[in-house]
Image (cartoon, helix red, strand yellow):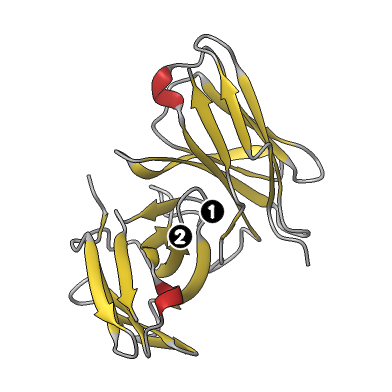
Amino acid sequence: DQQVKQNSPSLSVQEGRISILNCDYTNSMFDYFLWYKKYPAEGPTFLISISSIKDKNEDGRFTVFLNKSAKHLSLHIVPSQPGDSAVYFCAAPRNAGGTSYGKLTFGQGTILTVHP
Amino acid sequence: KAGVTQTPRYLIKTRGQQVTLSCSPISGHRSVSWYQQTPGQGLQFLFEYFSETQRNKGNFPGRFSGRQFSNSRSEMNVSTLELGDSALYLCASSSGGQGPTIYFGEGSWLTVV
């Protein structure tokens, strides 16, 4: 049961343009979401998070939007830079009983390539 | 502030052996969780420890176990290694509170031959 889905395996963008990475979820108990950037054979690096009480959170070039009714979130990177090329994961922390945030459920990841 | 530290970074083991991986969380963090990343299965949750107690567990066989010490440092152990256990093992730490941000270590890359 894939509770967090990233349906686009890859995205290619020109430097300076906007990158939009999408994520869908099915579990209505998820009320907090995180985005991570990951290089091969390294640990994920935390980028930005959003709570379900918000519909937008911004940090520098990164903005995350949450549409609760559609169970959809997106990460916008503006402007995109070649150094942003990596795999991006969305993740939701919640255990099955909804009693703790200790378990991250990850999407499959989207490979972002930013061309100079 | 030091990040999440995992040791060893790389190791090679033979089928049937056992392995222990270590994780030191960010100072003050009481929750430590472990994940396995493989090309076919993506990032999968193994287990979480909070204040020395296992609080959450993923769908892995009993060969995978872990523990947490009073200083919040954690270890995970895999016994009777199989070729399919070759993966990047990631440790993450968080405060364990409301709306946590979860930080990852660099990972331990295990190859089983």
Q: The N terminus of chain A lies in which quarter of the figure?
A: top left
Decide which of A72, A86 is in the foreground and name it.
Answer: A86
The residue under the point 50% across, 90% down is A60
Residue A114, visible in the rendered structure: yes
User: Would you say A37 lies left or right of A106 here?
Assistant: right
* Residue A96 % position (x, y): 38, 47
**Among the 4 quarters of the image, the one containing residue A50:** bottom left
- Please state which amino acid type lies under the numbered disc 1: Gly
Question: Can you give x and y, in whole percent of width and height, for residue A10 in the image?
Answer: 23, 63
Circle 2 sits on which residue? A38
**Foreground residue among B62 and B1:** B1
Classify mark 1: helix, strand or loop: loop
The x and y percentages for residue A86 are 40, 65
Q: Residue at x 50, y 18 (%)?
A: B63
Of the 4 image quadrants, the one containing the C terminus of chain A is bottom left
Does residue A72 appear in the picture of this structure?
A: no
Please report contact status of discs 2 and 1: CB closer than 8 Å, yes or no. yes
Q: Which residue is mark 1?
A: A43
> Within 10 Å of the Cα at label 1, are there few (<14), some (14-19), or many (20+) other Cα atoms?
many
- Residue most toward the top? B16
Neighbourhood count class around disc 2 (C-alpha, 10 Å): few under 14, some 14–19, many 20 upward: some
Give left or right: position of A88 versus A6.
Answer: right
Q: Residue at x 51, y 54 (%)?
A: A100
Tell me: A31 left or right of B2.
Answer: left
Task: Report how far apart the C-alphas of labels 2 and 1 lie in the structure.
Answer: 6 Å
